Image (cartoon, helix red, strand yellow):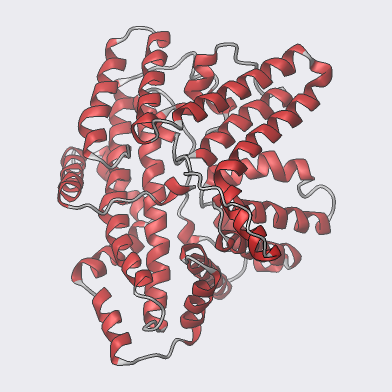
Amino acid sequence: MVFSSLTFICIFLPAVILGCRILPSIKAKNALLLVASILFYAYGEPVYVLLMIGNALCNYLWAILMEKFPERRKAVLAIGVIQNLGVLCIFKYAGFLAESFNSITGLGIPVPQIALPIGISFFTFQAMSYMIDVYRGDCSVQKNFGRLLLYISFFPQLIAGPIVKYHDIEEELLNRKQSIDGMARGMRRFICGLGKKVLIANTLGAMVDGLFAAGTGDLNIITAWIGTAGFFLQLYFDFSGYSDMAIGLGWMFGFHFRENFSYPIIAGSIKDYWARWHISLTSWFREYLYFPLGGNRKGKARTVINKFIVFTLSGIWHGANVTFLLWGIYHGLFLMLEEIFPGIRKEGGLLKKILVHIYTLIVVFVSMAIFRADDIGTAFIWIGNMFAGMNFSPAAMRLVMAQLTPLNIVTFIIGCFAATPLIKPLACRAWAEKASYIITPAMLLLALVFLAGGTYNPFIYFRF
């Protein structure tokens, strides 16, 4: 089940909201939310819901063992980390590793055909954060398995984030208020995210998919930049829209999740970009990997290496494909570059700000070609066309003109504007005034019309 579906919006969500409003105690509300979350996941993954529950149970037991045997807590933590990463590797990377081994050695070992559980990277990282927090003493051991399972399986952030750390909502699992104001704010945030996803991301996604499906023979510099810039906007509005919906749903039920995006299109460096893009993942890697590796406390050389390691592993986290590994290495190299030459990030005049911003956008858009391509060869062809695609044959220009439909042009312009902070004052003013009583229902109605009339409705980050 996805948030941008009529089943979720018209049946599932109203039923859960009504149930939580009727039930008097936090204990009863938690029980309802837990059952609803399991049903939500089982709707699309009826078998793998047992994997998610089993993984939560393992982390519940690791934490209890750390409390019971404090002298062996480091060994228990190591076993727990191996167990979590082992499950992740089996389901996410077993087939890729077997194929890679066969191609390198020429052997023909069987390649396991294992379906990827939706959201396994997200709920595994959340479970690990709880276990590590207990080890560090940042949170107490949760003796109630139901509460821990609710934290890991809570449906707003279960299958595509944002990644929520246990210590961020530990108190709200026990004590929270489901107010009318929070409900209203949550609904507005949810509808805003739904609009971003359905009206902008889906429209641009259909265009981008068409370009990448057209092959590389008719590409040129125009279609290459339309495709990569369009994919950036699609990915941003798809994922930030999902995060808005998750944050809004959290507010509806009395939970407060941290922001996951902060206008990455205005970033002034790659370091700044990663402080604005998928903030919960960047924060997770910083807190649970970068700092344990030494962070920036052991000299510049070690800092550079640590950043490279983190982003290489971030690429691997995204999926079992060489393109994701290359994407992580690519970002890691530019972060290393900015660490070695910090003048890139230092404040300067207007001209420097413009040049550094252009540099950042070019680096990011090139990374989008790597991230979106099915294989390395296709990625390099796209990148080559971004800078030297001088194919202006009739077939290539027909491909260009096919993208310049009124709907695509208008959506692209709106997307560019809505991805910047320029929209924030207008949005805040609209929500604060009576206009919100018109804008919100109108946006919801328009999104529902699009959903009822179309079949293209993917969530990109589901596969991660």
Residue pictured at 82% horizontal, 59% vertical: 301
Residue 414 percent location from the top left of the image: 29, 61
Q: Residue at x 60, y 37 (%)?
A: 87
For residue 167, what is the image quadrant?
A: top right
Residue 162 shows in this picture: no
Name above or below for residue 140 compared with residue 277.
above
The quarter of the picture where residue 165 lies is: top right
- Answer with left or right where residue 367 lies relative to residue 101: left
Front residue of 216/254: it is 216
Give the percent coordinates (x, y) of residue 356: 57, 71
User: How far across and down, in percent of the image, does residue 179 sit?
Assistant: 33, 20
Q: In this view, does 332 lie to the left or right of 453?
A: right
Residue under the image location 63 percent in, 32 percent down: 128
For residue 66, which quarter of the picture? top right
| 124 vs 382: above or below | above
Instruction: Where is residue 270? Give x, y as percent.
Output: 59, 62
